[in-house]
Amino acid sequence: MNVEKIMNDLEKKHPGEVEYLQAVREVLESIEEVYNENPQFEKLGIIERIVEPDRVLTFKVPWVDDHGKVHVNIGYRVQFNNAIGPYKGGLRFHPSVNLSILKFLGFEQIFKNSLTTLPMGGGKGGSDFDPKGKSDAEIMRFCQSFMLELWKIIGPETDVPAGDIGVGGREIGYLYGMYKKLAQEHTGVLTGKGLKWGGSLIRPEATGFGCVYFAQEMLKTREESFEGKTVVVSGFGNVAWGAVTKVTQLGGKVVAISGPDGYVYDKDGISGEKIDYMLHLRATNEDIVKPYALKFGAEFHAGKKPWEVKCDVALPCATQNELNKEDAEMLIKNGCICICEGANMPCTPEAVEVILEHKLLFAPGKAANAGGVATSGLEMSQNSMKLSWSREEVDRRLHEIMCNIHEACVKYGKDETGYVNYVKGANIAGFLKVAEAMVEQGII
Ligand code: NDP
Ligand code: 2IT
């Protein structure tokens, strides 16, 4: 495989799709060696086939606001690869959404889902709709209009969407209601559903919990734990909330969370009712963390990122490319030993390079945040069986899956010196299973 040639060809075919090209390059660089050891991959064009989505649907989403004015957004679903199971991946509603971002997320999702050990292919979707400041009724009308198109190509054995940025329990409810009406069936077509109508316990917490379970496994390799550790988290959404909750349960102290307006530094630690307040902040749809500082007497640093705060462990849980080289250098200088990605691709490639050079414990999102989609997979299993597992049962399975992913990363990522490159490990382990499935299923 010639990575530069493949990347040049892709850049020509998909000019300007920066995030997508960034995600592909990272995977190709990691898997080059194992790819070349398997000549059949080259012969069967596995790379050329895996980097292009199976199909992309884009559609118009017209909706009416509370004043009777009509707006039009773009809706997307990228069905990337279904070699090991139905397409599976979240929906993102955010003004920055475009095809490049959804292709990067869909591409990552293929390998992440493969790592979960469950039978799920990769997909992603969403819209450039901005939920900020919208009323419940506006969100409902938007979701209904979105589903009016999406329902044609999804199904419990075909493609199973879920939440992501801007899509939580409320949106999944409105989307599901419309799907049910159109398809005339009550089925596991979406995950992240409400508990009363097919949802799974632990799904809301799962991404954050999983990320912390993964970090815990990494810390164990150096005979460390969360007990007494100072932790900095970015974001204050679903993933950040789950991560803060679990770190606190494990005896760590989270001293910072952040939003698009800046970060909050709470020297006493974010625990108890302060964690519940994060949910309130997110539900207001205002997307700011400053009210936390005002309410609990913590420091607020406007327009700043939390990476300047001294910590042992950093958990970036907001969005892609939010932690750059300078941020990484600052964390390292301040003694950080572990960076575990709760978000998808939050560290820039330059940041990852510095982090790996300094041999920190570093987990890429496709391994560390796989707990969310893994628990979606467990929701699908429960829907198929028409049963609901207890909180303990789901949490036990989630924990086991995160430990298995950690083991797979160590297996493929450990170098001669004993250092584990989890980026390499996750990419190789995730890729091999999908590639082998593609080989066995022929050219389709
Ligand atoms: P939420 O919508 O609950 O929170 C996302 C947070 O990130 C918000 O504070 C949001 O503020 C901020 N944000 C989003 N985009 C940007 C941007 N371009 N620049 C700056 N800030 C931004 O989302 P989640 O917690 O669900 O998702 C967080 C991350 O975790 C994402 O990378 C997502 O892909 C990933 N993830 C989520 C999973 C899930 O199950 N929910 C599973 C695995 C990964 P604002 O909207 O104002 O920008
Ligand atoms: O990025 C992700 O893994 C998610 N947003 C969760 C996807 C899912 O199908 O649960």
Image (cartoon, rainbow, N blue to C red):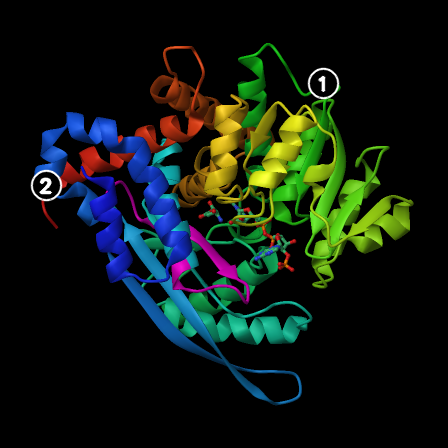
Residue 44 is marked as: 2
- Sequence-wise, which precedes: disc 2 or disc 1? 2
Q: Taking 283 as reference, is 417 left or right?
A: left
Residue positioned 68% across, 23% down in the render: 335
Residue 227 is marked as: 1
Tell me, yes or no, whether the highlighted magenta stretch contains residue 316.
Answer: no
Q: Which residues are magenta?
A: 83-100
Q: Quadrant of residue 343?
A: top right
Viewport quadrant of the N terminus: top left
Residue at mark 2 to residue at mark 1: CA–CA distance: 49 Å
Let me know if residue 187 appears in the view: no
Q: Residues within 10 Å of mark 1 (few under 14, many from 20)?
A: few
**Measured from the top left, where is residue 392 in percent x and y?**
59, 28
Tell me, yes or no, whether the highlighted magenta stretch contains residue 94.
Answer: yes
Q: Taking 144 as reference, is 77 left or right?
A: left
Q: Taking 352 as reference, is 168 left or right?
A: right
